[in-house]
Amino acid sequence: RYFHAALASTHVYDHTAGNVTLALGIDQEELEELLWFFRREDPSTWNYSVLALSFVAMILGLVLLAINIVRNRKRKIHMYKEAVQTAQQAELEAKQALMPVQEYSPAE
């Protein structure tokens, strides 16, 4: 019912401002006291805890990065060894395939 008036008027009317404390279940004095408490609270404890959590997250990230680097190196070394072993086996099979030809003598 205020929609048309809000579009036509530049004045702001907040009809719920008086009922906010009733909706929260606390009166105006308690609300002002809580607002004053949180306004004058020392934020250094919060700042230190966030700083500590950020250092813990950084250390955890560095540990996971180191673990990932080590595993990738081991995986690449293992793949390289398998490739070398496969190449050596293929070379050995090729040499063995040529051995009977070299051992064959025309006299026999």
Image (cartoon, rainbow, N blue to C red):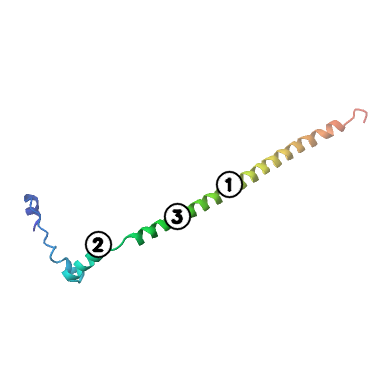
Q: Helix, strand, or loop for circle 3?
A: helix
Residue tagged 2? 39
Which numbered disc flags the more N-terminal residue, 3 or 2?
2
Q: Which mark is residue 55?
A: 3
Amino acid type at mark 1: Asn
Label 2 crowd bin: few (<14), some (14–19), many (20+), radius 10 Å: few
Q: How far apart are labels 2 and 1 at the CA level?
A: 51 Å
How many labels, in total?
3
Contact between marks 3 and 1 (CB within 8 A): the answer is: no
Q: Helix, strand, or loop for circle 2?
A: helix
User: What residue is drawn where x is 60% and y is 45%?
Assistant: 73
Residue 44 is situated, as x and y percent measured from the top left of the image, at 34, 60
- Quarter of the image where one finds residue 86: top right
Left or right: where does residue 102 sit relative to residue 69?
right
Which numbered disc flags the more N-terminal residue, 2 or 1?
2
Amino acid type at mark 2: Arg
Give the residue at the far top of this rendering: 106
User: What residue is drawn where x is 70% and y is 38%?
Assistant: 87
